[in-house]
Image: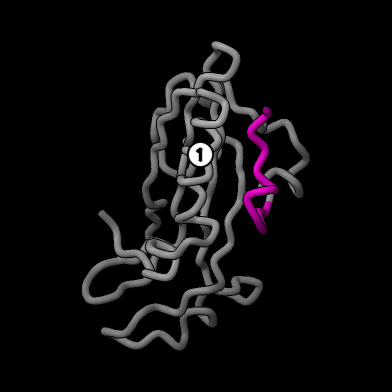
Amino acid sequence: AAPQAAVFNQGKTLWQGLENYLLDHAAQFDRKLTVFTGPVLHDSDPPYRGMQVPLRFWKVAAFLQSGALASTAYVLDQSPDLTRDADRAFAGAKPGEPPPLGAFRTFQVPVVDIAELTLLDLGPLPAVDLMPPARAPETRWRRLESHDDIDLGS
């Protein structure tokens, strides 16, 4: 368990709605689907009420497509604007109050990036990713504005 802002945990927008979208897509194409999700923990995550609040969360979807295993991965980033340095970004934080969070940004990312960010062994999923990491660095993470931006290789 990890603290989350209610606006994305319970909201119907991209992040919470992403899992429903994936489930609906699996049902539409009669696919088996498993979704793994969790926080990206980092030493620099800001404290709130004695706990660090993760600034990023991830999802990895594993499913059968044409009889073969396939996967996709996503990151929600709620970091403050770090175009400034981190000390300035967190300068307004007050003990006991919520940390300064940025806008929620959702990205479709290579599964291997989730494995690297979380230090989790995701087994065969990086090798069957529908968004291979061979893309150029500036387009490696695809920012999602709506479910239409999601690439499920269908």
Q: Is residue 1 magenta?
A: no
What residue appears at the point 55 percent right and 23 percent down from the top-left corner? 70
How far across and down, in percent of the image, does residue 140 sit?
70, 43
Amino acid type assigned to the residue bearing label 1 in the image: Asp
Q: Give 64 or 143, whichever is nearer the viewer.
A: 64
What residue appears at the point 52 percent right and 17 percent down from the top-left corner? 69
Residue that sits furthest to the top in the current view = 67
Q: Which element is circle 1 on?
A: helix
What residue appears at the point 41 percent right and 36 percent down from the top-left corner? 35
Q: Report whether 49 appears left or right of 40.
A: left
Q: Report whether 72 appears left or right of 83.
A: left
Residue that sits furthest to the left in the current view = 50
Residue 83: quadrant of the picture: bottom right
> In the displayed structure, would residue 56 be above or below residue 79?
above
Q: Which residues are magenta?
A: 143-154
Residue 2: quadrant of the picture: bottom left
How far across and down, in percent of the image, does residue 48 sit?
29, 75
How far across and down, in percent of the image, does residue 43 sit?
37, 60
Q: Give 61 or 84, whichever is nearer the viewer.
A: 61
Q: Is residue 144 magenta?
A: yes
How far across and down, in percent of the image, does residue 52 sit?
31, 66
